Image (tube, coloured by chain):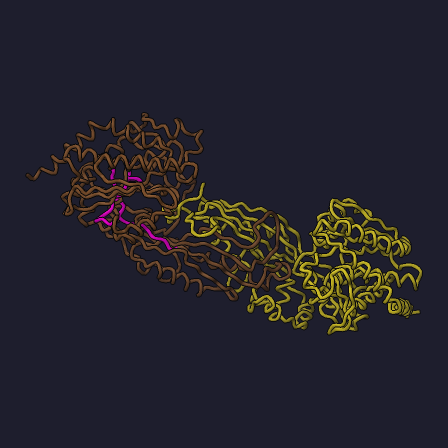
Chain colours: A yellow, B brown
Amino acid sequence: MLDQPQSNIEKVLSHLAENEGAALERLFSFLRIPSISTVSDYAGDCQKAAEWLAAQFEGLGFSASVRQTPGRPILIAHSDEAGPDAPHILYYGHYDVQPADPEELWTSPAFEPVLIDGPAGKRIVARGAADDKGQVMIWVEAFRSWRAVHGKLPVRVTVLVEGEEETGSPSLKPFLQAHADELKADVAVISDGNMWDIASPSITTRLRGTVYTQIKLRTANCDLHSGLFGGVARNALNALTQLLGGLHDEQGRVQIPGFYDDVPELPEALARQWDALAFDEAALLKSFGLATPAGETDRPALQRLWSRPTADIHGIWGGYTGEGRKTVIPAEAHAKISFRVVPGQDPQRVAQCFRRFLDDRRPPDAEITLDVLGAEPGIEIPADTRWMRAVRRALGDEYGKPAILGGCGGALPMVGALKSILGVDALLFSFGLDDDQVHSPNEKFELRCYRQGARAHARLLAELGRAT
Amino acid sequence: MLDQPQSNIEKVLSHLAENEGAALERLFSFLRIPSISTVSDYAGDCQKAAEWLAAQFEGLGFSASVRQTPGRPILIAHSDEAGPDAPHILYYGHYDVQPADPEELWTSPAFEPVLIDGPAGKRIVARGAADDKGQVMIWVEAFRSWRAVHGKLPVRVTVLVEGEEETGSPSLKPFLQAHADELKADVAVISDGNMWDIASPSITTRLRGTVYTQIKLRTANCDLHSGLFGGVARNALNALTQLLGGLHDEQGRVQIPGFYDDVPELPEALARQWDALAFDEAALLKSFGLATPAGETDRPALQRLWSRPTADIHGIWGGYTGEGRKTVIPAEAHAKISFRVVPGQDPQRVAQCFRRFLDDRRPPDAEITLDVLGAEPGIEIPADTRWMRAVRRALGDEYGKPAILGGCGGALPMVGALKSILGVDALLFSFGLDDDQVHSPNEKFELRCYRQGARAHARLLAELGRAT
C-alpha cells in the first residue's frame, strides 16, 4: 500500500474543497472581531478573539484554554488523540491585528470582510486577512478536514495563538518560560508572512540575529564655547562622526577587524538557487525612492539581505538640536548602532570586536561607554531534518515545484524564543504576498493563497504523520 | 611744554586716587541693583539701573536719556563740551548681569557688594563686579576725575550702555540701525572682558568670524526596517557620519578643499609675541578634564585659538533616540556645523567650499540640503591707527610694558555690529581676569584691576585728546 499517504491526503483535500464556503464563513466571523492589540480600547475584543478560537479548538477535539497575561490573553490548545508516540507539533499564530486607520482609505470597512475580484482571482479583504488570522485558519481548517476524513489527527498538536504580536510580544517570553514543559514539542510550525510569489512556495531557513549597541562618548567635563575654545578643546560629535564614519569602506564592507571572521560562505547550491530567483533589487529600491544598492558592492542582493552581516546606525544625538544657532562644543554624544549577524557569528564576539574597534580608533580624551542592549545570534534551520523534509515535500507536491530555501534579514522574536527557551526549531513557511498591504488599508489575502495554504497544511499533516 | 600731557594726566590720576572711596561707593550703589536681564521679574531693576546711569552722566555734564526697546532699555549719553573738532569716541558697556543662582554658593549675597581680602589684595565681590558694571564705572570715574581737574573732557563722547548683553543683545542691532547718525563716532572703546593677567595689559586686535550651517541629508522616502532591508537600503546616518567623519585629517586639518586658501600666516613679529606669552594650554585643557589639544597639531595653541579657522559640529540628530532598541534605517539625518573663519577668509566662499565638499563626497541616493544660517567675517582691528596707538601708549604707560596684541576666538556681536552698521572700529581692552567667575557664584573684580583700569582709561583720554 505504497500509495496510502497519497490517497489519505486526496480525501482530505477533497473535503477542504467541498467545505470551503463554510470555512470562509468561519474565517469571516474571526475577522469581524476587531482584536486590535495596540489600542487598549480593544482589549475586550482581544479576549473575545481568544475565546472564539478556544471554541474552534474545542470543536476539533482539543482541550483549549484562554490564559491571562499582563497584556492580552494567549490561547493554548492541546490534541493528544494521535497517541503518545506520535510526533508532537507546536503551531504558533497570533489573533491580534493592527489598527485600521486611516479608515477612510478602506474601500470596505476593515472589520467587515468581503470576497472581491482582483487580478489574481478572488481575494479576501479585511484587517487581519493575511496577518495573521487567515494564515491561522488555514491550518485550523486543515485539522478540521483531516479529522472529518480520518477521525483523528495524525500528530499530537499544541497550539499557541498570542494576542500581542503587533505590540512586540511582551508577554510571550515569560509565558514560554513559565510553561516550557507544557509547550515543549518536536518542532514548531509558523505561517505568518509571505511566500516568494503566488506560484512559488518558500521556506525560511535562515534568520539574521542582532547585536544592538549604544555608545556614549564623552570628552570635556562640560560643553564649551566653540569661539573661545574651538581649535583647542575636543568636540564629542567631531570624535563620534570620525569613529562611525569609518564603519564602512567604499565597497560597503564593515571595517571592524574580525567582523567577517566567522561568516560562512553560502553553500554553492543555495547561492545558485538564490541567483536563479532573479530578485529585482532595482524595483525594491525604486519603491523606496532609491537607485543604488547599499551594502557590500561585490555581493548579490539576496546575500546582502539574507546571509551577510551589516552595520546600521539607528540614531545619533548630541549637542544643540534646537532652532537656529548655538556655538557649542558638545562634551557628550550618543549613538545607537546595531549589527545584523548571521549563523556562524558569535554575537558576543561581534560586540567585543566593535568594542576593540572603538578602543583602537578612540580619539585622545574621548571616553567611550559601550552598552550592549541585546545580542541574539542568527538562526539557521537545518534543511535536511525529517521535519524540514516533510515541509519540502508538502509544498513541492502542492505547488509542483521545489520550495525556495530563503532567508529573512530580520529576527523573528518568536523563532528565537522557541529555540532558546523550548529548544525547538521552527518550520517557517507562509502564504502571504508582498502586496497584501498588511498594516495598511485594504489588507487582503488572495483566495488562491488561502486555498493552497490550507491544502499545503493538510499535506504537511500527512507528511508529519509519516515523517522520517 | 613737551611735558604738558604728562602733568595733565598726573593730576587726574591723583584725583582718582584721592576719590577712590567715593567712587567705590558709587560702584556699590550700581551693583546693588539686581539688573538681571535673563529673568523678566527683574525688568524693573534693569530700568532702575539705566536711570541710575543716566543720573551719573547728567552729573558729568552729559545729556543722557533712557531709550526704550522691545526688551531692556538702552542708556544713551552725549558730551560735546570738547567742541566740534575734537575726536568723537563711542563708549560701549552693559548694565545687565547674569542671575545669581545658585545663591547658596555665594559667600556673601550677590547684590550686597563687599570689599574683601584675596591673594592679590582687596577684591570687590558682587554679581556684575567685573561683568560689566565695574568695567563701565572705571571709565565713568576717569571722566569724572578728568573733568574735576580740567573742567571738561578732551574728546567728544557718546555713551551706549545696553541691558541685553547677557541675552544676546536682540535689540542692539535694530537700535544701531535706527540711530546710526546719532551714534556714529571716530572709534569705539569697549572694556568688557579679560586682560592677559593682572600685570599684563592686552588689546584684542583680531576676532574670528563664523559660518554657521545646517545640513539635512535624505536617503529613502521613508524609514525602513534594518532587518528586512539592511544591506540594501541606504542609511542616512551612515551617510552623514561618513561625510562629517571626513571633516578633519589626523593632523586636525580641515579637509575641505580651498578652506585654507585665504588664511594669512600670522606676521612674524606677532607670532613671536604670542609664543613669548608661554600660554599654558595644558592647564586650560586640564580645567576642562582634557589632556590632548584638538585642532591642527602643527600650530601653537594661541594660533589655533586666535588666528586659525576651525570646524565644529554643534549638533546631530536623526533616527531613533529614545530608550532601548529600535531597528530603523533612518531616511533623514540632520547636523549643525560651523566654521570659525579668520580675517582674510570670505565667509561666503567658505560656505561654497563646504557645499562643494558635501557634493563631491555625497553618497549615492543621498540628497543634501545645506542651509547657511549665518556668515560673518573675521575682524582685524589695525594696530597702527592713531586710536590704537593711543590705547597702546595708555596701557604701556600704566603697566610699564607693552600691551599684548591678542585675539579672540569668538565673535563679539557688538564689534561686528559697530563695524557693519556704523563703520566704526572698536578698541577692545579689558581689565577682568580669567578667575573672576563672571556668570558663576562669587564674581569678583580685583581692586588692583579696578584701579589700574580707571587710571588706564584716564590716560587714554589724554592720549585720545592729542592722538595723531
Identify whether B305 is placed above or below A384: above
Q: Quadrant of the N terminus of chain A?
A: bottom right
Identify whether B141 is placed above or below B206: above
Q: Magenta includes A377?
A: no
Q: Which residue is located at x 74 percent, y 52 percent?
A: A419
Report the side of B218 relative to A63 (left or right): left
**Chain part drawn in magenta:** B183-211
Quadrant of the image occupied by residue B33:
top left
Identify whether B249 is placed above or below A10: above
Q: Is residue A223 visible?
A: yes
Q: Quadrant of the C terminus of chain A?
A: bottom right
Residue A116 point in image, percent of width and height: 77, 70
Q: Which residue is located at x 27 percent, y 29 percent?
A: B24
Identify whether A416 is placed above or below B433: below
Quadrant of the image occupied by residue B467:
top left
Report the side of B441 relative to B320 (left or right): left
Q: Which residue is located at x 52 percent, y 50 percent?
A: A317
Report the side of B170 relative to B145 (left or right): right
Q: Which residue is located at x 17 percent, y 48 percent?
A: B386
Report the side of A339 relative to B34 (left or right): right
Between residue A253 and residue A278, name the one nearer to us: A278
